[in-house]
Image (spheres, grey):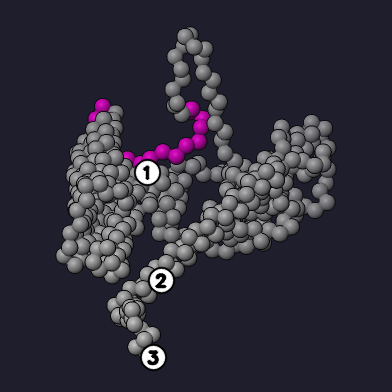
Amino acid sequence: MARSFWFGRKKPKKETPKEARQRYLGEIMRRELEDKKRVEKEMHSLVKQINALILKDRKSLVAYQRKVKDEDPRSVFYYRMLRRVGLPEVHARFAPWFLKSNQIELNRWSAVLFNRLEQAFFAVPEQLSTVEIRMRAHQKHYDDIMKPRSTDLAAPEASKSLEPRQKNHFLLQRAFRDCSFHVDEDIARRRQQQAAITGVKKPPANPQATKFDDNQEDEVDKLELIPEVPVVNAPPGLAPQVRGQLESHGKHVFFSYNGRWKDGEMHGSLGVYSFADGGKYRGEFVHNAASGNGTVVYPNGVKYTGAFADGKFHGFGVMEMERGYRYEGEFLRGQRCGVGKLQMLQSGAVYEGEFYNNMRHGQGTETSTLGYSYTGTWRCNRICGKGRLFCSDKREVFRVDWPPMLLGEVIRHVKREQAEESWRQELCPNGA
């Protein structure tokens, strides 16, 4: 019976292990593609929903307006102050009433500002960095030299007795009062003028409180800023425009220079120029500008040693930047331009080649600590165009048209292509 059943028919071919493995891999790849398409579809719909919510929130967000005619103007000023320091609109509208101020999420600069206000209010010692300590010391030294000493000895002694919390509280009240609405004349001074005219002086209910207020007034008067003078341009064609020069009764912070002079200008082979923010330049000067060899150190930690021209980096120099960057090469009018070497000390990567406008641009080579290196064309800090990638396993990948990518992106791109090629060879070993 078995022979008659299979007579004239082909027996089913038995599946080999290799064919079973290929079928299994093909099924896995098919499922991965389906999952990828499903995830992309879900992400696309989710992004649409997020954009719709953002647009809806923007439409419903209205600008702050006074609801009551006699509303406290201090809240308006406080709202504007919060907006200027970077607090979002949705938080600044409700912050003046302090309903849920402890739930407000601040950005970086707003958090720094409110931390300093809180430290001053509770008399907590301020945590300063090394650069800030040096800048404070430099400013204090400048104030001791330039500011006139007060002849009144009673007021400073009385002001020293004030607690930092009380002094800060009064300064905030003074700021809110003066900035919320315009005051032609201070109330205390107006009362003094009335008393001088009439000759009648009202006895204070609490003499100690009057002494306390007078001391506060003297202390605050020292902190008042001198306003800038408004400059009005002349009518066109009648007189030259006024240049942006400082007025004689303005309040400004100048520099300190110790070096050689010539014809009333900073000119010589050696001079030390100290900036108001704590920076310092030491080197040659030509006609009031840094020209020649010199060294400059900035408060943010940047240090440059090399050639200068007209107050800018020009020529060969070495710049050590924050976050572990070090550049050694050519500069042109204050920017990295020419041939140089850039070292990223944190990652260990090194780039040697051409620069233009502070960017890697031209022919260059970048080497990473993982054993990969690229030699070829760079455009605007990106690998772009003709170049060769040297892998850690001694393989080389040459392309005529690399897309704009960083070295790490190029490495991942090549690895992904190699993995896809190996999968194709496993699925189709005969090239079918």
Badge 2 marks a residue whose secondary structure is: helix
Position of residue 97 measured from the top left corner of the image (x, y, whole percent)? 74, 53
**Left or right of 284 on screen, residue 119:** right
Residue bearing mark 2: 27
Amino acid at pointer 2: Glu
Q: Which mark is residue 275?
A: 1
Query: Mark 3 or mark 2, which is nearer the start of the sequence?
Result: 3
Q: Is residue 43 left or right of residue 401?
A: right
Q: Dividing the image into 4 quarters, which one contains the C terminus?
A: bottom left
Q: CA distance from mark 3 to mark 1?
A: 108 Å
User: Closest to the observer: 169 or 419?
Assistant: 419
Circle 1 residues within 10 Å: few <14, some 14–19, many ≥20: some
- Which amino acid type is marked by label 3? Met
Relative to 42, is 257 above or below? Answer: above
Residue range in magenta is 247-263
Residue at 72%, 46% in the rendered image = 75
Mark whose residue sits in front, 2 or 1: 2
Verify CB contact (< 8 Å) between mark 3 and mark 1.
no
Of badges 3 and 1, nearer the viewer stands 3
Single out the residue that lies furthest toward the bottom.
Answer: 1
Residue on which disc 3 sits: 1
N-term mark: 3 or 1? 3
Q: Nearer the viewer, residue 59 or 338?
A: 59
Q: Residue at x 44, y 14 (%)?
A: 240
Q: Which sits in the foreground, 143 or 5?
A: 5
